[in-house]
C-alpha cells in the first residue's frame, strides 16, 4: 500500500512506461503484473498471446466504462483532438497552406468563416467551443434533439443547431469554409456522412478535418495522413486527416489522460485489481486477460481464439 | 427658483402639456413663456408665425445637441423605436399576420431567422440588441468601419458586421427573414437603400420594418401606415411602416423622453434660459424664436421668411 | 427498405399527410398501414373505432417517451410555444393592443417590464430565454429547487428564481407586467395557479399569456381564443389564451417537429414497427391500435370500450 | 537621466516616501526637490507655507488632469474604493454585523439582495461590477442618460438603469438592501442625496456604504468612521462611512496607484518637470508651488494668501 | 387536510418551531407528533431516547435523499455557506483584518487575487461562482474529471480546472491568496487535504476559509471559531473556521431551507407520513424513530443501542 | 460622376490594380491620375521621383488619419495580423512544429497555456480576443491605465491587465507559453521590449510571435521570416516573425482593407480629390505628391530631396 501521493504518481508513471517496449519483447510481463494502458488487442494476435502466456492481468483503457455508460478514458483524447481540430483547420485555411485564404474569425466589416461541425459528442462539443471562441459562424449537426438543445442552452443562440440528415448536411456544406468530422461510434467504423459528390460542390479552398480518422474517417475521401504531411487535395478542397492528433501536444495530452486514469491507478495500486473493481464497476469492462485466460469475447471473436 | 424635485417634475409636466392645444389656438403663448418641446417648425408656417408674434422663447427638442454633436433628445425615441421594431417584426413573421410563418428565435434543431439591420446608429444598435437577444442570426451593415468594430467588440463575434455597399446589402437580403431599416440622417430625407428590385428577389413572407419612415423611409416602397393597419404587401413580402412607433408604448416613451429632457427643464426652471445656455451649450442649438424674432436659419429658408 | 435520405424524407411527408383527411373518411386506413402522428384518441370514439376496424398500426406522438421518461414529441411544440409567448406578450403590452403601453426591454433610464414565468419546464425555460434576451427583469417560479438551481447556474444571477407557493406567487404578480403561464402536467388538466383575486390586484394593463390553455389553462379566468381574436379583458388586465400557438409559425413548427420525429419515421420505414421498438423502447408507449385491437388502457377507460 | 527600469522604479519609491515625514518637519524640502504626491493644500496653511518657503517644485496628484479632463491619479483609488464598498457591504449585511441577515447573492429559490448604486462614475461602475458579479439585483442611478446607456450596453439588461431624481431614488431605496453612495464632485463637497427621511422608510437592517465620505459624504447622516469601528445605526439601518477605504488593501492600492503615477514619475525623473509638462499637458494642472511661489488660484483663495 | 397555501405555510412554521425547546424538555413530544428537522441523533443519546420514549415519528433533514442520491435538505445550506465563504474571505484579506491587504478583484493594472477552491460540489460550485463574479483568478480542484468538465463548459475557460492530487494542490496553493476548503463527504469526517507543511510555504497574509469545519474541517490546522472571533493565525496565514456559517444570514438561510423542505412538509401535513413516503421515496431515508422504535442502523451503532 | 454602386466598385478595383506594375515602369502615371494605395515613399527614391515627374496626385494609405488621430487604413491589417498571430502561435505550440507540445486551450483537468500580449492597441486587442476565445489564460500589458481599464470592462475580469514595465513584463514572461509582440509605434521602429536575457529564462518550447516585425520587431532577437519557413530557435524557444502576415489570408485581408478604403475611393471618384478632402479632412494627411510637387515633409527629409 502506498501512503504518499508522490509514490502513487511514480507508480502510475511506471505502469504507463511499461507499455512501449511491450510489443518488442514482452519480457517484463509476469503473473503478478497489472498492465493498464491502451491495448487494442483485436488488432494484434501476438500481443494478445503474450499477455495470455504471461498470466498477467491486463486492463484496456479503451473499454473501461463509467456509470453513464461513457468511455471515460477516451474522453480526454476526444477533447484534445476536437479542440486541436479547429486550430489546425484555421491554420490550413491560409492560402500558404492550400486553403482559401480566409481568416477564421473575420474582422469587423468582413464576415468570418462558417465552421460546420458534424456530431455533437465530446469531439464536436470541443470543436464548437473553439469555433465560437474564434468568432466563426458555427453550425453543429447531430441526430439527437436533446444534444442540440444542450448547445442551444449553453450558447444561447450563438450556434446554429441542425438535425443531421443528408439534405440539411448538404445545405450546410455549401456555406462552409471549414468542416470538422466528429462522428465517432465507439468500437465501430465511422459512418461516411460526407460523400465525394458533396465535396465537389463546396467552395474552393474549403478545409475538411476528419477527427474520426482513427476509426476510418467520416468523409468518403478520408485517408490517414501524418503531422509531417498532414493534408491533400480532394477536388478543390483540402483534407486534413492526421491520425493520432493528440500526439502533437503530448505534454498536454499526457496530463489530460493522467487526469482520467489516476483514480483507477491509485486504487489498483493501493487496493489491488479486485478492490478497484468494487469501487469502479466499469473498470471490469476493461479486463482483457487474467491468470492466463482471455476474458474479452469481442477480442476472442476478432482473433479467432 | 424651485427647491424640490417634485415641483421641478410638475413644472416639467406643465411645460410638456402646453404643446397639444398649441396648433389650434396659440392662446397660451406670451412673451414670458418658455416653450420647450418637439416643434418641427419647417413644416408649419402658421405655428412659426404664432411663435414669432407671441414673443415667446421657443426651443425645439429635435435640434438640441450634446458635446459630441449628437441629438440627445432624439436618442430615447430612437432607442424605443429600434427595440420595438424587432418585437413587431417578430410578431408579423407569424403567418396569421401575413409573414412567412417563421419563429424568429428558431428552436433547437430548426435554425432561427436572419435579421438584417441596415444602419448601426441608435436605432440599429437597439435592433441588434433585440435581435441577438431573441437568438436570431443578425447582420448589421454600416458605412463606418469604427461602428462595425464596436459591434464586433461588444458581441464578440455573435453578430455579422458588414460594410454597407449595394452588392453586400443585396447578398444579405437574399438570406433575410426580417429587415430593419435604421438609416436616419438628422434633418434630411432617409436614403432609399433597398430598391424594389431587391425586394422582388427576397424569400416569400419576409418582413420589412422601416424605422426611418418618419423621415420618408429607407426602402423604395415604404409608405406610412398606422398601428391600426400597420402592414401591406410588396411583391411577396410584408412592409411595416408605422409612423411614430413609440406612441404605442407611451408609458415607457414618456419616461424615456423625460429622462433626457429633465436636466434641461430643471435648469431652465431654476436658472432661466440664459443660465441654462451657459451650462448646456448645445441647448442653444434648439433656439427657434425669442423676443419676436425667428432665430433659425434653416427654418427661415424652408418657410421663405 | 429505403436507401436514400430523400426517400426517407418523402416517406415521412407521406405518412404525415395521411392525417388530415382521416377524420372525414378513414378510407386510407388498412392493415398494412402504420399511422404515426398526434392522435388524442381519448377525445374521439369514432376515430378510435375506425383505427380498430381498419386493423392498422397506429402510434400517437403525444405518448411516446424517451429514456428519461420525457415526452420527446411534445418538446419541440413546447419550445415553440414558450418562445412565441414572450414575443406575443411583448406585442400585446402596446397600448394599441390593450396593454399598459410598456416596452418590454425598457430603454436606458426607464426600467424594463418584469416578466413572471410560472413553471420551469420546457415552456418556461423557453420563455425565460426570450424574456432575458429582450432585457426584461425575469422571475421564474417552480416547485423543484433543482430546476431553480439550473436557471441560477445558466443565467448566473440574471434571473430571479423563486419557489412556487401562493404567497410568493402573489408577491411576484404585484410587480409583474407580463405573466407567462407555463405549467403543464402531461395528460392532466393544468392546475389553476393564478386566481381571479390575484388578477384583481395587478397593475392595469398587465398581460397574461396562458401557454397551458390546450390543457385547460393555468389561470382561473382563462378561456380559449384564436389568432384572429387573441385577447380579452379580465378586470384591468389583458388575457391572451390562443389555442395551438405554434400553428402561427407553421413553417418553423413543422421543421421543429420533424426534427424530433424523423428518427422514428426513418426506423419504422426501414426496419418496421417492431424493429423500431427494439431501438427506441419508448416508442412502444405510443402504440394505440394494432391488428384490430385497442392497446391503450387509458383510452379504453376514457372511451368506455 | 536614468537608463534602467529598476532605477526608475527606485526613484519613484524614493519620491513617494518623502511624503510621510513632511508634515512634521519639512526638513527634506529644498529648491532642487520635486515633490509629487497627494497634497490637499487647501486644508493646511503650514504645509503650503513650508512648500513656498523651501522653493521646491510641488505637484499635487489630486489635480492632475488627462486629455479628457479626467483626474487620472484619483481613478485607481476610486476603483479600489468602489469595489471594496460592495464586499464590505455584503459583509455587513450579516446579522452578526448588525445587518438584516441577507446573503447578497441569494441562493436558488431565495431571491438576492437589491443593491442601489447612486452615481455612475468610476466608483459607481466599480460597485456595479461587483454587485452584478455577486449576483445581486442592481440599480444604478445617474443624471447623464449617456452614462446609463453605457451600463445598458455593457450589462445587456442585467442592470436596472434609472435617471437620478429624488422621486425615483426614493422608490429604489424602498426596495434596497444595500445602498452605495458613489457621488463625487471633484474638489467640492458631495451633495446630500439621501435624506434622513428617506432612511427612515427603509427595510430594517439595510446597509449604507458612503464612498463619498472623504468629501463629506452623500447621505445626510454620514459621519466618518474607521476600519476599527466602521459602522453605526441610523434608525433601523446600518451606516458604513470608513474614511480612506483603500488603506485596508494597501498592498493592492499601492500597486494600483503606482500604475497611474509611474509614467509621470519616469518622465519627471528623466526629462525634468518641464520636459514632463511637454509630454503630459495635464500634469501642469497639478503644479502647486515652484521657486517660492504659490501657483494655484483655488489654494490661494482657500487659504487667503 | 389543509386547503390553502397560507395554512400550509403556517403549519410548516409550527413544525419548524418545535425544534428549539426540544433538547431541554421534550415535553411537546407525543405519539401523534411528526417531528421533521435537523436531528443529528448520533451525537445525542438523551435526545434519541426521548424520541423513542415519546413514540413520535421523527424524520431527520440531514439524511433525506432525492432521486439522484443527493441530500436535498443539505443543499441550500451548502449553497449559502459556499457563497458566504468568498465574501468573508474577501473581507478578511484586508490588512485591518489580518490578511495580506489584497483586494480580491484587483483593479485594472493590478492583478486580482487567486482563489483556490478545493472540491467541486455544491459548496465549491457556489464559491467558484462568487470568486469569478468578483473577478478573481479562480482554480477549482476535484477528483472527478466529469465535474471539472462541467466547470469548463459553464465558465468557458474562465476558471482553471485541476484534478486534485497532492502535487497539483501544492502548486496551486503557492499562487493562492484565498483558499476555500469545500470538501464534504456526507456523514464522514472531511479528509485533511491541506497539511501544515503546505501552509508554511504560502504567501504571508493568505486567507483560508474552511467550509467543511462542521465535519471537522479539511485543513490540518482547522479549529472551530465563531462569528464573534472568526479567525486565528497559522504561521503567516489567517484561518477562518466559523461553524454554522449560514447562521449569520439567517433571514436568507431560513428562506432557502424552507424552499427545500416545504414540499415535504406540505405533503406530510396533507397526506400523512406514509402518503408522503409514497410520493417522495427518499423521505423514508430520513426516518429515525416511529412508534417507540429506533429505525436508523447507523444511529443504533453510533449510540450502542 | 458615378451613379451606381457597381461602377464605384469597379473604379475602386481599377485604382487599386494600378499599383503593381508601378515600380517597374511608372508608364501608367500621368497628371490626371489619382493614385491611392500603400506607398511608403521614404523607402524608395525612384518611385518618389517618378510620382513627382508624372505630375499625378498620389495619396498614401499609411498616413491617412481619422478624426481621432488614428490611422484607419492600417487598422484592418492590424486586426487581421493580431487575430492570425494567436492561431499561428497555437499551431506552433505543437511539438511537431518545435513548440512545447501544449494545447493552447487545455482541457478540463489540464490547465491551458498562458498567453502574454504586449501592447493593447488594435493588434493587441485582436490577440486578446482570440486568446480568450481559445480559453487560454491571457495577460495584456500596456503603458496606458485607460487602455487596461477598457480590457477589464470588456472582459469582466477574464483577462489579467498589467501596466507594462520591465519588472512586471519579466514576471509575466516566466509564466508564458505564448508571447504576442503587439507594440507598434506608427512611423517609428518598434521598441525592443523583450531582451535576449528575458528569453533565456523562459519555459522550453515557449513560442514568440512578433507582429511588429514589419517595423523591426519588438523582441531583441526578432528577424524577418516567411510563411514558407516561419520560425527559428532562440535558446529553447521558438520565434515566429513572418513579415506581412495578412498576405496568407489575402481573401479576407482584401475585403477588410476595401472595407476601410471604399468610402474614400467612392468620394474621390465622384467628387474629386478636393471634394474628398472637404468631407474627410484626414485624407489630406495622405497627400504625397500633386502637380509635380512633393508635399510630404517627412519624405523630403528621409530622401534628402
Image: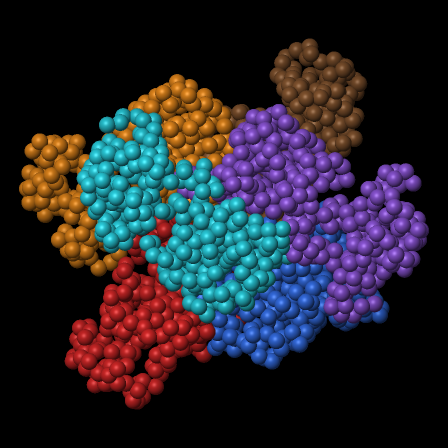
Chain colours: A cyan, B blue, C red, D brown, E orange, F purple
Percent across and percent down for residue E141 are 37, 36
In this rendering, position of residue C161 left or right of residue C87: left
Can residue F262 be seen in the rendering of this structure? yes
In this picture, is C217 found above or below C114? Answer: below
Left or right of residue D2, residue A176 in this image: left
If the image is split into quadrants, where does the N terminus of chain F sit?
Answer: bottom right
Quadrant of res C41: bottom left
Q: Is residue D93 toward the left or the right of residue C302 in the image?
A: right
Where residue A220 sits in the image (x, y, percent)? 45, 62
Can see residue E219? Answer: no
User: How many numbered discs sit on the rendered protein?
Assistant: 0
Q: How far across and how far down the image is residue E75, in percent?
A: 29, 43
Q: Look at 72% across and 20% down and name the residue there.
A: D2
Indicate the quadrant containing the C terminus of chain F: top left, top right, bottom left or bottom right: top right
**A77 relative to B159, above or below:** above
Q: Nearer the viewer, residue D52 or F242?
A: F242
Residue appearing at x 27%, y 69% in the figure? C276
Which residue appears at 22% of the width and 59% of the height? E3
Front residue of B126/B288: it is B126
Q: Which of D255/C23 is in front?
A: C23
Quarter of the image for residue D64 reads: top right
Q: Position of residue F218 (x, y in %)?
A: 67, 34
Name which residue lies at 67% across and 54% down.
F250
- Check the image and report above or below for F295 versus E103: below
Amino acid at each position: 500500500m502506498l501512503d504518499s501521493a508522490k509514490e502513487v504518481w511514480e507508480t502510475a508513471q511506471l505502469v504507463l512506461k511499461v507499455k512501449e517496449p511491450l510489443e518488442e519483447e514482452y519480457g517484463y510481463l509476469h503473473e503478478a503484473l497489472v498492465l493498464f494502458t491502451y491495448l487494442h488487442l483485436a488488432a494484434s494476435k501476438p500481443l494478445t498471446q503474450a499477455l495470455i502466456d504471461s498470466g498477467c492481468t491486463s486492463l484496456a483503457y479503451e473499454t473501461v466504462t463509467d456509470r453513464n455508460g461513457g468511455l471515460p478514458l477516451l474522453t480526454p483524447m476526444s477533447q484534445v483532438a476536437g479542440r486541436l481540430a479547429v486550430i489546425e483547420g484555421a491554420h490550413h485555411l491560409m492560402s500558404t497552406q492550400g486553403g482559401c485564404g480566409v481568416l477564421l474569425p473575420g474582422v469587423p466589416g468582413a464576415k468570418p468563416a462558417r465552421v460546420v461541425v458534424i456530431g455533437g459528442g465530446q469531439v464536436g462539443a470541443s470543436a464548437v467551443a473553439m469555433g465560437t471562441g474564434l468568432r466563426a459562424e458555427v453550425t453543429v449537426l447531430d441526430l439527437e434533439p436533446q444534444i442540440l438543445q444542450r448547445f442551444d442552452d449553453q450558447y444561447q443562440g450563438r450556434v446554429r443547431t441542425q438535425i443531421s440528415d443528408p439534405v440539411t448536411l448538404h445545405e450546410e456544406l455549401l456555406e462552409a469554409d471549414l468542416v470538422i468530422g466528429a462522428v465517432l461510434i465507439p468500437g465501430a467504423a465511422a459512418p461516411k456522412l460526407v460523400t465525394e459528390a458533396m465535396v465537389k460542390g463546396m467552395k474552393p479552398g474549403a478545409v475538411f478535418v476528419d477527427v474520426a480518422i482513427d476509426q476510418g474517417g467520416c468523409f468518403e475521401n478520408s485517408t490517414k495522413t501524418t503531422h509531417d504531411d498532414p493534408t491533400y487535395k480532394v477536388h478543390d478542397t483540402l483534407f486534413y486527416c492526421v491520425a493520432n492528433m493528440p500526439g502533437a501536444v503530448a505534454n498536454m495530452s499526457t496530463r489530460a489522460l493522467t487526469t482520467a486514469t489516476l483514480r483507477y491507478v491509485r486504487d489498483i495500486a493501493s487496493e489491488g485489481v479486485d478492490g478497484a473493481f468494487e469501487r469502479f464497476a466499469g473498470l471490469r469492462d476493461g479486463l482483457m486477460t487474467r491468470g492466463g485466460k482471455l476474458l474479452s469475447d469481442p477480442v476472442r471473436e476478432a482473433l479467432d481464439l
